Amino acid sequence: MTVKTTHNVTPLSSARPGRRPRRPGSVLSYVTDDHVSVLWDEYRGLYVAVCERCCEGLDTERSDQAEDWAASHRCDPELAALLADVTTRRRAA
């Protein structure tokens, strides 16, 4: 599990199957599939689901929508490969 800290973002607790994340408090973020994170953005008052592999994401007021998007998200293989190639080149430079 990867835990990230971002300014004005309160991470959510680890989700278990059939369990929805709670509204913000002192909880942790969770990663659903080793590349999709779901966070609570306190500043905007939204749940944020984002894929680190292809950079697609969803902002929503409902935690169940963010969790469902994260669970059903499938990366575009060509886009993911292109982004991986670009980031690998930047690290090498």
Image: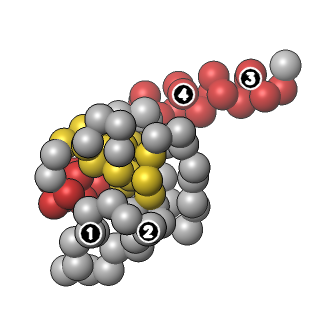
Note whether 41 is above or below 31 in the view shown.
above
2 vs 4, front mark = 2
Q: In which quarter of the image is residue 14?
A: bottom left
Of the 4 image quadrants, the one containing the N terminus is bottom right
Q: Residue at x 35, y 45 (%)?
A: 42
Horizontally, residue 42 falls left or right of residue 10, namely: left
Q: Find the distance from the CA under tag 3 to the CA under tag 1.
A: 39 Å
The amino acid pointed to by label 3 is Arg
Label annotation for residue 27 = 2
Q: Residues within 10 Å of mark 3 (few under 14, many from 20)?
A: few
**Can residue 83 be seen?**
yes
Q: Which of the marked residues, 3 or 1, is nearer the chain's N terminus? A: 1
Q: Residue at x 34, y 73 (%)?
A: 15
Q: Could you tell me which secondary element the residue under label 2 belongs to? A: loop
The amino acid pointed to by label 1 is Arg
Q: Find the distance from the CA under tag 1 to the CA under tag 2.
A: 8 Å
Note whether 25 is above or below 82 in the view shown.
below
Label annotation for residue 93 = none
Which residue is identified by label 1? 22
Q: Find the distance from the CA under tag 2 to the CA under tag 3.
A: 35 Å
Horizontally, residue 45 falls left or right of residue 34, namely: left
Of the 4 image quadrants, the one containing the C terminus is top right
In percent of width and height, residue 56 lies at 35, 34
Q: How crowded is mark 4: few (under 14 residues within 10 Å), some or many (20 or more)?
A: some
